[in-house]
Amino acid sequence: MTKILFLKNRLTSGSLMIYMENKEEKRLSTKEYWDSILEGARLPLSVNRKQYSAWLIDGFFREYILEGNYRTLLEAGAGSSAWLPYLAREYNLKVSGIDYSEPGCRICEENLKLQGIDYGEIICSDIFRWKDHKKYDIVISLGLIEHFENPGEVLKIAGEHLNPSGMIITVIPNLMGLNGKITRFFMPDVYNIHKKISASELRNLHEERGFRTLNCGYTGMFYPMIIPWQVKKDGFFFREGSRMRKITLKTLEMKNALITKMLRLMRIRPSSAFLSPFIIYCGIAAQES
């Protein structure tokens, strides 16, 4: 039995112009873009802690989620999520998700079912039109808020769906350093659908919305596959369908595996504004008076 909740995404002609002015103009990417990315996911989707990126992010989860008596979690931007099944099993959480991509939501639910997860629900809705009053102990987002010109508004909505003293964890790519410079050079279109946010700016965005900061900072060391080479489909090395593309991607993956294995085994988790691939924020929602 499906637990996808489809909220109407269509608008009347009278409200369309107001909605476009208030919301869509502040989006840096399109629904069509995300549909095309998310619908290509292959099941099952799972988190492998042997991967450096997963080890970095999950280390942050372990530090803070295990400290509290948390029972429910919502992932905002959960299309084709690999993290929800992992978080449900590893931390004994009843997980839910929200995303506005129909293919992403369907794959997310199929993935949860395939892995035998007893989950809450997958909400298929634009987050700006999400009006129910459900609240969760934890709200996470992994690469979501930087796709909006107004990320503080996304955080505001997340806060409205947190229980008192609930926790928010926000992960964004660090595009202010080496990661951003390489992406901008090789994939300017991808670079341009991201708002560039520093660690101090990420902290301020949350605190302006009433969150009490537990931790915020850069984490990890740069590695080759933090750059989304898979979406690049032009140029001599990456032309779609070419043998050279396959060779290039395979070479990058092999080098990445070696580098990240060394980084993980050496437990290298520096905090560098230039070299770190991620910025992670963790905070607590204000208690209701």
Image (cartoon, rainbow, N blue to C red):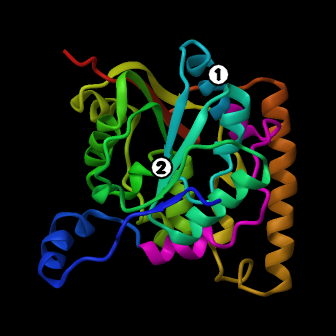
Left/right of residue 123 with respect to residue 14 in the rendered view: right
Residue closest to the eye, 37 or 85: 85
Left/right of residue 172 with respect to residue 103 in the rendered view: left
| Residue at 37% in and 44% down | 197
Residue, disc 2: 175
N-terminal of the pair, mark 2 or mark 1, is 1
The residue segment tinted magenta is 31-56
Q: Disc 2 versus disc 1: distance between alpha carbons?
A: 25 Å
Residue 173 in view in this figure: no
Residue 146: x percent and y percent?
Answer: 40, 52
Residue 129: x percent and y percent?
Answer: 29, 59
Q: Secondary structure at mark 2?
A: loop
| Residue at 75% in and 43% down | 47
Q: Quadrant of the C terminus?
A: top left
Q: Amino acid at mark 1?
A: Arg
Q: Amino acid at mark 2?
A: Leu
| Residue at 80% in and 86% down | 242
Label ID, residue 62: 1
Is residue 124 found inside the magenta-colored segment of the image?
no
Residue 67 in view in this figure: yes
